[in-house]
Image: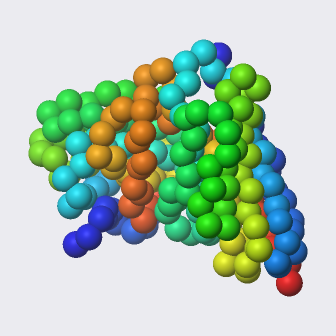
Amino acid sequence: GQNIDQPTEMTATEGAIVQINCTYQTSGFNGLFWYQQHAGEAPTFLSYNVLDGLEEKGRFSSFLSRSKGYSYLLLKELQMKDSASYLCAFMDSNYQLIWGAGTKLIIKP
Amino acid sequence: IAGITQAPTSQILAAGRRMTLRCTQDMRHNAMYWYRQDLGLGLRLIHYSNTAGTTGKGEVPDGYSVSRANTDDFPLTLASAVPSQTSVYFCASSDGSGSYNEQFFGPGTRLTVL
């Protein structure tokens, strides 16, 4: 079967670093996506990993280990506007996205 | 318009009524999708279309139907609404349906079925 898991909620301090983990199981894999979703808004694309390793994009980085079924999103120099839900999703063998329930990130001053 | 739009923004509907949620994109994307998002659950795919004239069933298609008469529009119809269809519905589109498939989302429709 297929499943994907990420923590429900995390809290971090403004200016700090936070790592949001995502684990998945699937027989067919075509990449791992991270999206950001502010409350009451639509998800917006953050990153895509299909090969093992770290992809860096400004304050945000995403890591993938295909052998471990594991990814993380690293957010540096946290700002209050980073308070949002972060959605992890993998693309299965049918090129459909299977979504985690999202991690709500709370930033405290 | 720029991007992807949905209508209505929100709707309260009596059980048993028929309802069509509208979705329009102006990016000339080939693929379009309908998801529902419920508290504590990930986005779940209802139906999708890889190109105009074709549609497919997602994870939770029962009680919903779609059509794709042209590239821009992808309406979702609830033939006879039930309370379990209370949810936030997102329409999305992507340029292709292959492995790199960044999806762009509309603002969502909040539907309540009483």
Residue found at x 82% / y 78%: A15
Which quadrant is the C terminus of chain A positioned in?
bottom right
Q: Position of residue B42 (x, y in %)?
A: 62, 43
Q: Position of residue A62 (x, y in %)?
A: 66, 49
Taking the image as shown, residue A41 lies to the left or right of residue A76, namely left
A75 and A8: which one is in front? A75
Asked if residue B16 is positioned above or below residue B59 in the image, the reply reads below
Marker count (numbered)? 0
Which quadrant is the N terminus of chain A positioned in?
top right
Q: Which quadrant of the structure image shows residue B79?
A: top left
Residue found at x 51% / y 28%: A30
Q: Which quadrant of the structure image shows residue A26?
A: top right
Taking the image as shown, residue A46 lies to the left or right of residue B79, namely right
Residue found at x 72% / y 22%: A67
Q: Position of residue B3 (x, y in %)?
A: 30, 65
The image's colour scheme reads: rainbow
Say if residue B62 shows up in the picture. no
Residue found at x 72% / y 28%: A69
B29 and B63: which one is in front? B29
Say if residue A73 shows up in the picture. yes
Asked if residue A69 is positioned above or below residue B15 in the image, the reply reads above
Q: Which quadrant of the structure image shows residue B1?
A: bottom left
Q: Position of residue A96 (x, y in %)?
A: 45, 31
Asked if residue A103 is positioned above or below residue B96 in the image, the reply reads below
Taking the image as shown, residue B108 lies to the left or right of residue A105, namely left
